[in-house]
Amino acid sequence: MKTDSTEDRMVDEDTSDAGGDEIREHRTVRWRRGTSSEVEEQIAVEEPLEIRLAGRRFTLTMRTPGHDEDLAAGFLFAEGFINDASELDEIRRVRGRKGAPDPNAIDIILNVPAEGLRARLKRNFVISSSCGVCGKTSIDSILRRVAPAPDSARVEPATLLALPEKLRAGQRVFAATGGLHGAAIFTLDGTMLALREDIGRHNAVDKVIGHALTNAMVPLTHQIMMVSGRLSFEIVQKAAAAGVPILAAVSAPSSLAVELADEIGTTLVGFLRDDSFNIYSRPDRVTAS
Amino acid sequence: MKTDSTEDRMVDEDTSDAGGDEIREHRTVRWRRGTSSEVEEQIAVEEPLEIRLAGRRFTLTMRTPGHDEDLAAGFLFAEGFINDASELDEIRRVRGRKGAPDPNAIDIILNVPAEGLRARLKRNFVISSSCGVCGKTSIDSILRRVAPAPDSARVEPATLLALPEKLRAGQRVFAATGGLHGAAIFTLDGTMLALREDIGRHNAVDKVIGHALTNAMVPLTHQIMMVSGRLSFEIVQKAAAAGVPILAAVSAPSSLAVELADEIGTTLVGFLRDDSFNIYSRPDRVTAS
């Protein structure tokens, strides 16, 4: 895959390489214990990104700027529009009228025959519009395109318990603004491989999956994914598409997230904080050594 | 507006009248301080809802069951597909093959001429697809359909500081599962008028706006809206459509949320918790008496 972005595409060691575009200052009245003062408050940036396919608008998403290539690649892969990195031919920044790159548009050239692409678009927009997905039908369709993660993946409870602090420590934009979700990939012994932040929970997951995809790390069959918030159906679906066997979150899963994880054999860990966690499905992958 | 639902449509006094459909039990392995045990864990329900217009699929959203009529009405209104409650002719439960109501589908008959409706659908899907909205263009378009909230609305800091506890106390499903967002409407002196919960933040807002719309409370020009999470662009947009002058949240706003609030004159309050809060726009509405 070629890209004309100057963005750093190396594997992050332990932090998000978030830049200045993610934070904006805003004059704010702060009220504390009965007195008010004016301060410059740091706010997480939210801007629309238009994702085009060969020049035509494909989708529009509100996101935090930065790692747009990861977001686009991860979205297309996690939602089943592309099957692997070889189908991503090129990711281009779109030029605005004055020739400067448009910060809020990106164009993707796929390496997929037009006919095959049409069928995929049709299939995916039926079962998984951006508004959501339709229960049982959707689970069946996901089952068809997801390879079961290998049963050999194992994690120790102590490794899981150490993940929230590592995630939090790496969330630079969250630390400044209190306003961003995070998603990270770890090895089975708890080493962080990549972390992405975004105002949208799904976007943070798409970004980290896109990073993994374009760095030949997919399928993530011997990795753990952890997210900062809750586990919805869509997050489980995206992690499954990337082959993740163990998916953990700081907060609660939904009923449909648990149902899907049960069906496809993902180990789902929730309320991972302080000295405890819950395992909702496939607890056999969590074992003390 | 007629409805054949048996759901209670009275104004809630101080709690969400959430029913049993919102919580499901699931056998879970709980790990606490080095030991594991099996428990029945309560999980927030997530199911798809298909919203139809005169029998044709209009949109599909993942939501927590309950108050589906509020959700559909609020969504259509907050996104600009209907202008007021008189344009909602009927909300019907869809019957499944065996004649029983389909729990995950709802059909709406609008009281809008076909031609006018087509124009609205076209306009709204251009500027506000379910994936998001497009910055400046969208702000302009929202400005055109939003009447400025009156400058006479005022709230005391002490009233704001008391809201988070009232919101939390009313969130019954959250209390059981830890997995739901909440949105509530309060009078300017802090009396809760309605509260809705949902797995999706936007849905909780749509539900409470739908409740207000179908109970002749809109425009909410002398009310406060409070949400449990963060403030995105879309939440500000929805509150503005309902005429809300003061919008508060437990957590952070995004840059585009602040920008929109600035333009349309909404008082935006964030990080409202414990003994403090921030005011990002129109601080003049917050005054000690």
Image (tube, coloured by chain):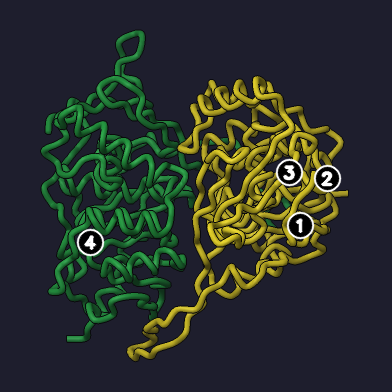
Chain colours: A green, B yellow
- Residue A238 image offset from top left, x and y in percent: 30, 53
The residue at which mark 2 appears reads as B217
B66 w.r.t. A76: above or below: below
CA gap, disc 1 and disc 2: 11 Å
Q: Earlier in the sequence, mark 2 or mark 3?
A: 3
* Secondary structure state at the residue bearing disc 2: loop
CA gap, disc 4 and disc 3: 45 Å
Q: State the quadrant of the C terminus of chain A.
A: bottom left
Q: Amino acid at mark 2?
A: Met
Residue A259: name its quadrant: bottom left
Q: Are marks 1 and 4 on the same chain?
A: no
Q: Nearer the viewer, residue B93 or A257?
A: B93
The label shown at residue A244 is 4
The residue at which mark 1 appears reads as B194
Q: Report the residue at 29% width, 20% height from top.
A: A55
Q: Please give the chain letter of the residue carrying mark 3.
A: B
The label shown at residue B90 is 3
Q: Earlier in the sequence, mark 1 or mark 2?
A: 1
Q: Please give the chain letter of the residue carrying mark 1.
A: B
Q: Residue pushed farthest front? A: B98
Q: Report the residue at 39% width, 71% height from top.
A: A270
* Secondary structure state at the residue bearing disc 3: strand
CA gap, disc 1 and disc 4: 41 Å
1 and 2 marks in contact (CB < 8 Å): yes
Q: Report the residue at 18% width, 69% height from top.
A: A188
CA gap, disc 4 and disc 2: 47 Å
